[in-house]
Amino acid sequence: MKPSSPAKPSSRPALSAPQKALHKLGLTRAIDLALHLPLRYEDETRITRLADAREGETVQIEGEVVNCEVAFRPRRQLLVTLQDGTDTCALRFFNFYPSQQKALAVGARIRARGELRGGLMGWSMMHPQTRPAGGDLPKALTPIYPSVAGLPQPYLRKAVLGGLANADLSETVPPQLSASLKLKPLWTLRQALEFLHHPKPDVAMVQFEDHSHPAWQRLKAEELLAQQLSQLQSRRERDRLRAPSLNNLTGSGLQDRLLKVLPFELTRAQGRVSDEIAHDLAVPKPMHRLLQGDVGAGKTVVAALAAARCIDAGWQCALMAPTEILAEQHFRKLVAWLEPLGVRVAWLTGSQKKKERAAMLEMIASGEAGLVVGTHAVIQEQVQFQKLALAIIDEQHRFGVAQRLALRGKTLDDELEPHLLMMTATPIPRTLAMSYYADLDVSTLDELPPGRSPIVTKLVAEHRRAEVIERIRSQLALGRQVYWVCPLIEESEALDLRNATQTHAELTAALNDGQALNAQNPGISAMGQAQRAQPSPAATDVMVGLLHSRMPAADKKAVMSLFVQGQMGVLVSTTVIEVGVDVPNATLMVIEHAERFGLSQLHQLRGRVGRGSAASACVLLYATGEGPRLSESARERLKAMAQTHDGFEIARRDLDIRGPGEFLGARQSGAAMLRFADLGVDADLLAWARATAPLMLDKYPEAAARHVERWLGGRTDFLKA
Ligand code: ADP
Ligand code: MG
């Protein structure tokens, strides 16, 4: 059923925008709409007399307009006085249309809904919702649904109503199994959904808000069951698949030879994790392992050792990284380690020249390349491996799940799947990993290589910028390098963020004592500057580079290599440097508008310094003055950053601040997320789902399939990756 568009003047074709928005929310099937539950409700079922109202309450009042004027006190506003027979209330509108003014003319009888404020001047409401008085009051609460821009609530409400009417809501969980759910009363899915979309006003609101109502419990149990079933299914499917067994090594001892040429000894944790991986690789079943280790823990060498084992057994290995900068860094490191040992390493990226690319594809297809390193380019269709046995994905959370799946489908041999090693520096607390990734084995690097000096983290208010610049000067004087990270590349009026381009110009001017290389043209690219600076770099010139995601790949590469080689003192950058970049001489990281970053992102960024043995610092600049105050959670994030450097502790706090749903959501783009259940709260329901899933899969396979299809639709593949 196509819900009709609400009457709203628009120059665009009336139906397409909200429907696109529905798709964006993943609401394509009737059942998806039926399972799209309200965020909260508004009570429009009653009218409150002003004489009975209390300050701060959100109420609906009804009465006659006795005054309507455009006032200037101090801002232009529409000021309407409503008289309900018991008292009057001022309604204020700062943005208003002529049509609104007309509907609120003196003499009109209207309903207004909003938060009541008291005060010397009597009752008032800011921007209340208004409508003509009269008509029946609704009998149920009015649902407010999670939505996106371009999808108005009335449209969404109608669509959901249609979904409820058309979806198959029959029970999937057999009564024998739902009986063990200790819910009283045990609601059916249909009862639960009909209730949650249109609850009677006599239910305590708190039961909706904390999702403790039996109807909520029922839905959460169903959702968790779907998630457990799907993971169990994919684990069982994977157990039936075969992968090359990588234990008949050629005897060239590639792994051992690599260990000998490394400029360091493995840490105990690296040794242990390498053993875990080697063990998996020797088994003819596809490995599905997540390697988690804090930034700087040394995951790359673990990956190199796994690759060496794979190549030594006569197979190919692919390593994929989310950005070109990071992929290239891996490439350089792995070439330096492995080519002297006789391994050919191929390089694949989107920005590559045609000829070079063709040569690489040939090397990969013929099997000449033992290792292939690259970006997303590695999973493009034209890339054919001769015999891929191991796929390694760095910073796995940055990849869409579909992309991870594509890598798995790269073997020529349909019988064999490659082993999969995923790496991440944003760890998932163990308890969460166990219950959430029923389908994944986890290895953890819980130790940093020796000799790292701790990073001192300072919170600094924005107005003390000048001191920060002084600090940069002193680091530069010591021959050190500095990162300066900005959250956005373009000025956004709404957010009023300083942008990277502007900061680049400012720093260039400040650090070159006013004789800025490019003061006239703040938009000049770092390359222009670099080219000018290179021929005769005056001793006092400080090269300040700019790196952001919209630059052409070649420019990014050039800027990055100037920084890596130490010619560039300061790198102003958006978060493109977030992952993996390894420049041990960089000792100071300044993060602008730190309050706008997520905790794990801040931790990732901070991990760019403190990679050598010199003392390093991270300055978190936060906004003060006009504009919104720091939110409670922003304050907690900054505090956590100042208090701890341990990635696992950071992850734990992140989990506390955000709750598991959002925590995992941010890490698993595209994955089927838990929408309703909360792993932190719903331990009992999760226990039920874990115990019930295998029973249901064995005894009621058809019901299980229906259940997974209902909840996860076409998205189950996501859970397998
Ligand atoms: P991450 O886990 O963040 O990917 P990297 O693999 O980039 O970390 O390693 C960070 C740095 O530590 C690199 O310069 C790497 O060569 C170095 N490194 C790795 N393992 C060791 C070790 N066992 N001893 C000393 N340095 C090491
Ligand atoms: Mg890394």
Image (cartoon, helix red, strand yellow):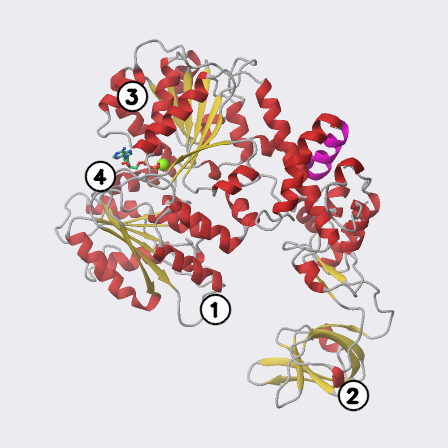
Q: Amino acid at mark 1?
A: Pro
- Magenta segment's dominant SS is helix
Which quarter of the rendered picture does the N terminus lie within? top right
- Could you say where residue 610 lies in the image, as x and y percent from the top left? 27, 46
Say whether residue 33 is left or right of residue 511.
Answer: right
Tell me which label, 4 or 3, sits earlier in the chain. Answer: 3
Quarter of the image where ligand 2 sits: top left
Is disc 4 surrounded by few (<14), some (14 to 19) or many (20+) residues within 10 Å? few
Tell me the quarter of the picture where residue 581 sits.
Answer: top left
Distance from label 1 to label 4 (Cα)?
41 Å
Say whether residue 140 is left or right of residue 576.
Answer: right
Tell me which label, 1 or 2, sits earlier in the chain. Answer: 2
Circle on res. 71: none
Q: Secondary structure at mark 3?
A: helix
Residue 464 inside the magenta-drawn segment: no
Circle on res. 86: 2
Which quarter of the rendered picture does the C terminus lie within? top right
User: Marks 4 and 3: CB-CB under 8 Å?
Assistant: no
Tell me which label, 1 or 4, sits earlier in the chain. Answer: 4
Distance from label 4 to label 3 (Cα)?
22 Å
Tell me which label, 2 or 4, sits earlier in the chain. Answer: 2
Q: Amino acid at mark 2?
A: Thr
Distance from label 3 to label 1 (Cα)?
52 Å
Read off the residue under disc 4: 565
User: Does 255 sit above or below residue 532?
Assistant: above
Q: Secondary structure at mark 2?
A: loop
Which span is picked out in magenta?
Answer: 702-715
Instruction: Please tell me whether mark 2 or mark 4 is closer to you in this view.
Output: 2
Read off the residue under disc 3: 338
